[in-house]
Amino acid sequence: MTSGGAERATRESERATRSLRVALVGNPNSGKSTLFNVLTGMKQRVANFPGVTVEHAEGAYVYEDARITVLDLPGSYSVSAQSPDEAVALDVILGRKPGVLPADVIVVVVDAANLERNLFFASQILELGLPTVIALNRMDKADAEDTRIDVPELIHGLGVVVIPVTATRARGIDRLRHAISSATSLPLPDPRAALGDDSDVERRYAWIDSVVERSVVRRQRDRRSVTDRVDAVLLHSVWGLCVFIVVLLVVFQSMFTIARPLADGIQWLVTQAGAFTVNVLPAGDLRSLLTGGVLGGVGSVLVFLPQIALLFFFIGLLEDSGYMARAAFVMDRYMRPLGLQGRSFIPLVSGYACAVPAIMATRTIQQREERFATIMVVPLISCSARLPVYTLLIAAFVPAVTVGGIFGLQSLTMLGMYALGTVAAFVSAAIFRRTLLRSDTRALIIELPRYSMPSFRVLAASVWQRIRIFLRLAGTVIFAISLLLWALARYPQPDAPANVTHEQQLSQSALGHIGHAIEPIVRPLGYDWKLGVSMVASFAAREVFVSTMGTIYSAGDDVHAPGLAERLRAERSAKSGALVYTPLIAVGLMTFYVFALMCTSTIAITVRETGGGLRGGAWAALQFVYMFVLAYAAAFVVYRGGLLLGLGGGA
Amino acid sequence: MGIHCAEPDAQRLRSLGVFEGAQVGVVDIRSGMVLDVRGSRLALGWDVVGAITVRLARP
């Protein structure tokens, strides 16, 4: 909506004398969220598959004298709720969700090209006896498939208003708006026509068949032949897997090649802003706060944006095109031995970008134990926040030589870290499913939607939405921590600041005292107090490690001074004169970062998604502790094992 | 067709149009099973396939 449009809408809503709450429900893949966008003008996601319509989205429009609030509810196949997503939808419809007002009108979105299956859920909703309007969506698809739907006959059969619409082309929207506004003054659907619960499915489908027989004129039977032919390859046990691996490779490769220059550009801007601040402000607390605290903190988050945006773009592309459901089906048999089903694979893949949305994406897994096991292991997958840590340490300590003439040792090390996390996630999942979270693995039952060309406008809108969530969730945390760290590293200041070196000043600061206090804990891993401080600081968010190391080793104001890697390599102990950091310590440290859960956002989302409150807190605590133990043990084994093998330690 | 699997799975299948006596088309049985259920495609994982018996309908 343009700002002019927004102003007009505000004026109109001031004039609105009546208000109406509308719940938008329907099967997954019925085009519900697209219709929501068109109705309310608010941007939202289209696909439901990996649980993108989490909780409920809300939007509003003004029609005649009424302000209409629309709730976009998660897609459901049946009112006997199975997944948390479906439970949310039902709770809102029945007015059982605390804090959400019950709906005045229910709009059931029905896919005209898949009428019978969609009418199953619609008929259940009609039996609730609430004011209901049926939006018969995808009329263009039905037309293209030579399916002629006699709408008056359908209205007669169902006993409620049916409005044909094509949400993707915004057709029929005005009539739908009119129907919504007048729905409360029409006779209610007759609950006496109840067809029993889910177990009496045969009678319900017999009724649906009779309605469809009277209202649908002709249908072309083998309309799915193209999709079926494509699926013959994509669902093949060998070719399907090959295609899936190639798709993943392409996604990750383009993520790095496209995101790198963008990230470099952002880094350049942040550096320029820092240089500008140094030029215009005199040395002192304010300048230090702006360069070290604000730019260092915000900058370290902004650099990840291109990669995260791209990953969400690709995941959205795969979902909206219909491929993601196929990938879940292909991966199902490989996930079985772990006690997980194919659906768990998508959150795990999303984990390479960020554990937060990945954990949110577990909502489509119906069974609690499977869902929780997936949540517990997702943070072991190396997310994009580990990338700067790996990059810094690899650049500093892994020689840039080639192995076997093709592969660089540096990229192999990087790949090794990713593989380590992935294997650990799989093994941990198998352990969780055999101990704490034991249950039968639920069968994979998944609809394969038609392949379709994703709308880039919708994709871009959803990526933008994710970017905003990321900035709000991670940016605020990192920002606050950066400021706190800056203050801890700067105060208390020595009496004569001019005479002490940066290192002495740091050592006497609050941060220095914390570092010395925890040194005994990190000593067995070969780390000194400065590394300890960086690690403690990065328990809030991994990215902070690099900026903290930057703060600690910066000569003054410039956090992103080039050559941090070189300074780490050259760092010598003040006492013994030996090198503080060795390749062995670096590998041990990276191993620690592979396993450790160092992200407050992930902890917060785990608490929320495992039930909230004390129960959610207990799961999050377990997740944190097991990952920390794993990380410490792994780093210890790497360091001590390396020493035993004579690979050399530090100071 | 006949279905013999855990009740939550059976319930899900039913709401998707797969129930005892329903007419479905079998699209693919090489890995798992892909069914044509009233025009929509439903993919079933390995273990649920074992619980489903599809009998050839008389033309």
Image (cartoon, coloured by chain):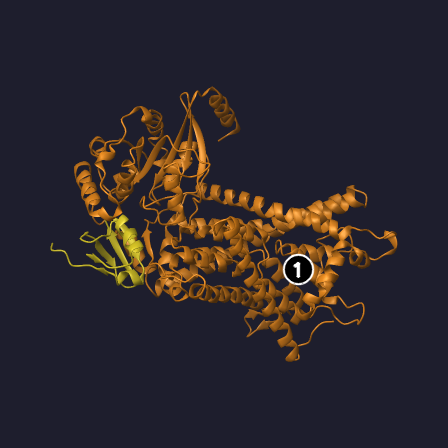
Q: Position of residue A461 (x, y in %)?
A: 48, 41
- Circle 1 crowding by C-alpha within 10 Å: few under 14, some 14–19, many from 20: many
Residue at image mark 1? A535
Residue appearing at x 27%, y 48% in the figure? B15
Q: Amino acid at mark 1?
A: Met
Tell me which corner region of the image, top left, top right, bottom left or bottom right, holds residue A511.
Answer: bottom right
- Please indicate whether residue A204 sits to the left or right of residue A453 in the image: left
In the figure, what tint was chain A given? orange
Residue at figure coordinates x 65%, y 54% from the top left: A544
Q: Position of residue A236 (x, y in %)?
A: 32, 62
State the residue in front, A571 or A641: A641
Residue A460 seen in the current view: yes
The chain under label 1 reads A
Give the quadrant of residue A188: top left
Residue A272 in view, yes or no: no
Is A332 situated left or right of A590 in this image?
left
Q: Residue furthest left?
A: B58
Q: Is residue A150 above or below residue A65?
A: below
**Chain letter, colour yellow:** B
Q: Position of residue A230 (x, y in %)?
A: 31, 56
Residue extending furthest toward the front: A614
Residue at the extreme bottom of the image, as rendered: A645
Q: How many marks?
A: 1
Q: Is residue A286 above or below residue A160?
A: below
Q: In the rendered view, does A490 fall on the left or right side of B22?
A: right
A94 or A182: which is nearer to us? Answer: A94
Image quarter where the C terminus of chain A lies is: bottom right
Q: In terms of secondary structure, where does tag 1 sit?
A: helix
